Each structure stands twice: as structure tokens, then as C-alpha cells.
């Protein structure tokens, strides 16, 4: 789960990292009041969970409270790279002397973290990394050792950062471990003209697997996530909404991803990713199907199950149950293979629902689902 800038800012503050004074609102009139409280001149920043807001017009200086209200009104309700702006953060402007880049990111393949740092931070960091990779230091961090003061000094030296940023690097590591994050990024970390080291922006990605031991996760959650994604999450189903028209359900992330590829190979576009998981019950299958069928973009559904721990007849029971409870108005192509496939096919055959088609191979099933999405 990605946090908004203002949430990241709050964490930084709690862990003793200097941040500008700031407040969030969704109301332009309130923006004026906040600006007055912050001294009049403010930076108005769109709160969206994507980077590059500055270049997209989502970070603007307002000279006085009236301008803050106008700017907030202009930014609220717009769209930044497909993300609707529902709130703005008003921040006290900072006079920047230099901008740095620092981040910790999980390197899954290596089983450790990577500290990435550069003395040339700011909005052009991607350009710097692409054209002059030597300007960006990459230092492995062993998660068991963490960022000690020796490690922080190593990062500071490798990146050519001011020595005083070492303390920030240690605190950022405390944010990462304390909050169970897999990414913490500050761009820019700045040295102000008054010599303070301050985090002017923040991106934090939390590890969803650590939900159970992080008391604050509920309140950090975005109330505006896709309603179907929220409904699926509440039922313990891995569901991601995509742009296309063929609903895809499978068991196991690998099989679902392969199914997405095969659907795309047939010239159709998957409408979602939905993994009912290994060992799924009939209820999970039926819940998953309800979620996919209630997506208005879905024009056909492809259920691709390879029975292992989950037996195919259980999956078929789930489909039948779903058909009895949700009014299916879209064609369903079901391919069952593996454990108890014959029994599963028989269950569906007996039900003989007019919208359910069975296929024996994944390719055949995907072709049929693509064709049905085209003609419904
Ligand atoms: P991003 O474009 O989404 O990464 O948004 P940032 O919060 O990083 O802002 C983009 C850029 O705006 C920063 O790199 C700064 O150069 C500039 N900026 C943001 N806040 C301030 C500020 O308080 N003072 C000054 N002078 N520049 C700022
Ligand atoms: Mn930034």
C-alpha cells in the first residue's frame, strides 16, 4: 500500500525528521484559512499517489491566502496522470540551497535492501540516473544489520551528500523498519539556505503482509480505493482491476498471470486479475465470481482452474452457487483441469446454465472468452 505525501510527511515528523509545516484539506476556502495560519505564502501540493506532480502542475507556489484558495480550487478535481486530486497539502515554502535524493528499496531478488542516494535530487532524478548513473550511489543494506552510523556514513560518502544527512538516513531506516515499509523515498531532501536538512517530499510503500502487527493500517487506508477491490480484500481475495473486458479468475498467481497473457494473445484485454488462491473453498469461488460479474466493464468471464489442493468439483460447486445467488448476465467460459476435473465438469454439465461454456484447454477457453466479449 502506497501512502500519500502528507501521510509520509507525518511519519517522518514522528521519527524526528525535519519537514515543512503543512496541513491537508479538500476545501479551497479552508485552504485560504490554512495559508493564513502558515504565514500567507504557501506551496499548494496535489495529494495523489504518483510522482512527477511538479511537472504535471500539481505543485504550485501561492503568494497569499487568496491565491492559495484560487490555486487549491484549480488543482482540486483535476487529474494527475489518471489520479483524481481529492485533497491538497498546503506547506510553508522553503528556500532551497540544494536538492538531494535518498531512498531505501527492497531488493527482493537479493534478499536485502538497497540504499539509493544522489547529491543531484529533484524532479530530474530519473534523467540523472539514465544519463549519468555514476551520480547515483547504490549501496546494499543487510536488513539484519540495518543502517548503522557506519552504513549511513558509507552512503553519504558514496553519494557526496552533506555529512549531516547521515542522521536523516538512520531515521529513515527507522521509519522503514518501524512501519514495515518496503520503500521509503525522499526526493527532494534539501539543504535550506538557513542550513537545515529537510524532507520536502516523501513516498512510502507499506508491506501489506505486516498489516496484522501495524495498528495504524486501517486509518492509513485510502477510503477511495476501487469499491470492488475493497470488497474483494474484505473477503480475502486477491483482486486487481484492469482496463479490459474479459474477467479472469484463476487459482494461483502464476496461473492467473499466464491466463492474462493468453487472453491478450487472443486480441482481447483482461478486465482484472483475480486469484482465488490455492485451497480455495466453494465460497471463495462464488465470492470471486460475484466480484468480477459486478464489474460493468466485464463482457465475458474466463475461469481457469488447475485443480491441485483446490479440487475442481469444489470450484464447480462455487460457480453453481454463484450462479444461483448472483444473476449472471454475462457468458462464462470455464476450463477445469487437474484434481477432480471430470467431476467438476459433470457438476457444471448437470447445472446446464445457458451462459456457461466449458473448454478443455486454456487456449481454447481464452479464444472463446475473447470471442464472447466481442459479441455480447
Ligand atoms: P513531485 O514532483 O511529485 O516529486 O513533487 P515534489 O514535492 O518533490 O515537488 C517538486 C519540486 O517542487 C521539488 O523538487 C522542488 O524543487 C519544488 N518545491 C517543492 N516544495 C518547495 C518549496 O517549499 N520551496 C521551493 N523553493 N521549491 C519547492
Ligand atoms: Mn518529489
Image: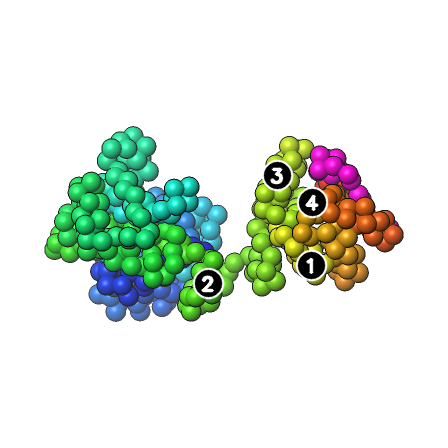
Instruction: Single out the residue that lies furthest toward the top.
Output: 131
| Proximity of marks 3 and 1: CB atoms separated by less than 8 Å | no
- The kind of secondary structure element at disc 4 is strand
Q: Tell me which numbered mark, 1 or 4, is placed earlier along the sequence.
A: 1
Mark 3 CB in 8 Å range of ligand 1?
Answer: no
Mark 1 vs mark 2, foreground winner is 1
**Crowdedness of circle 1 by 10 Å Cα count: few (<14), some, many (20+)?**
some
Q: Which residue is mark 3?
A: 258
State the image coordinates of residue 331 (x, y, percent, origin top left).
Answer: 77, 47
- The kind of secondary structure element at disc 3 is helix
374, 273: nearer the viewer: 273
Colouring scheme applied when the structure was drawn: rainbow
Q: Which residue is mark 2?
A: 211
Mark 3 vs mark 1, foreground winner is 1
The boundaries of the magenta stretch are 352-366
Q: Which residue is mark 1?
A: 281
Q: Residue at x 66, y 56 (%)?
A: 280
- Gap in Å between the C-alphas at discs 4 and 2? 30 Å
Q: Residue at x 77, y 46 (%)?
A: 341
Q: Tell me which numbered mark, 3 or 1, is placed earlier along the sequence.
A: 3
- Gap in Å between the C-alphas at discs 1 and 2? 24 Å
Q: Tell me which numbered mark, 3 or 4, is placed earlier along the sequence.
A: 3
Q: Tell me which numbered mark, 3 or 2, is placed earlier along the sequence.
A: 2
Mark 3 vs mark 4, foreground winner is 4
Q: Which residue is mark 4?
A: 306
- Gap in Å between the C-alphas at discs 3 and 4? 12 Å
Quick check: is 38 in the magenta stretch? Answer: no
Amino acid at each position: 500500500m502506497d501512502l500519500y505525501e502528507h501521510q509520509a510527511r507525518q511519519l517522518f515528523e514522528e521519527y524526528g525528521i525535519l519537514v515543512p509545516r503543512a496541513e491537508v484539506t479538500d476545501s479551497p476556502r479552508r485552504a485560504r484559512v490554512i495559508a493564513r495560519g502558515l504565514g500567507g505564502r504557501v506551496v499548494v501540493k496535489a495529494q495523489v499517489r504518483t510522482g512527477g506532480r511538479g511537472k504535471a502542475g500539481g505543485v504550485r507556489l501561492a503568494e497569499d491566502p487568496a491565491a492559495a484558495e484560487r490555486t487549491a480550487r484549480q488543482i482540486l478535481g483535476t487529474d494527475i496522470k489518471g489520479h483524481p486530486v481529492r485533497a491538497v497539502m498546503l506547506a510553508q515554502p522553503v528556500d532551497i540551497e540544494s536538492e538531494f535524493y535518498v531512498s531505501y528499496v527492497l531488493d527482493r531478488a537479493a534478499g536485502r535492501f538497497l540504499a539509493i542516494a544522489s547529491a543531484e535530487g529533484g524532479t530530474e532524478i530519473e534523467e540523472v540516473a539514465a544519463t549519468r548513473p555514476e551520480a547515483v550511489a547504490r549501496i546494499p543494506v543487510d536488513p539484519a544489520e540495518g543502517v548503522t552510523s557506519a552504513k549511513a556514513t558509507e552512503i553519504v560518502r558514496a553519494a557526496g551528500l552533506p555529512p549531516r544527512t547521515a542522521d536523516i538516513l538512520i531515521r529513515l531506516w527507522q521509519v522503514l523498519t518501524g512501519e514495515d515499509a518496503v520503500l521509503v523515498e525522499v526526493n527532494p531532501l534539501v539543504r535550506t539556505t538557513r542550513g537545515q536538512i529537510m524532507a520536502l517530499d516523501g513516498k512510502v510503500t507499506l508491506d501489506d503482509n505486516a498489516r496484522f502487527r501495524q495498528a495504524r493500517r486501517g486509518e492509513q487506508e485510502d477510503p477511495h480505493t476501487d469499491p470492488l477491490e475493497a470488497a474483494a480484500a474484505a473477503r480475502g481475495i486477491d483482486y486487481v482491476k484492469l482496463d479490459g473486458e474479459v474477467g479472469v479468475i484463476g487459482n494461483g498467481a502464476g496461473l492467473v498471470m499466464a491466463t492474462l497473457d493468453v487472453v491478450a494473445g487472443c486480441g482481447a484485454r483482461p478486465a482484472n486479475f483475480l486469484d482465488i488462491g490455492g485451497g480455495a473453498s466453494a465460497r471463495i469461488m462464488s465470492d470471486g465470481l460475484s466480484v468480477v460479474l459486478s464489474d460493468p466493464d466485464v463482457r465475458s468471464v474466463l475461469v481457469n482452474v488447475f485443480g491441485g489442493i483446490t479440487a475442481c468439483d469444489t470450484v464447480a460447486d462455487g460457480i453453481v452457487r454463484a450462479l444461483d445467488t448472483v444473476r449472471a448476465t454475462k457468458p462464462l467460459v470455464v476450463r477445469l483441469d487437474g484434481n477432480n476435473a471430470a467431476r467438476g465438469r459433470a457438476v457444471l454439465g448437470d447445472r446446464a446454465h445457458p451462459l456457461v461454456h466449458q473448454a478443455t484447454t486454456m487456449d481454447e477457453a481464452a479464444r472463446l472468452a475473447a470471442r464472447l466479449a466481442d459479441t455480447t
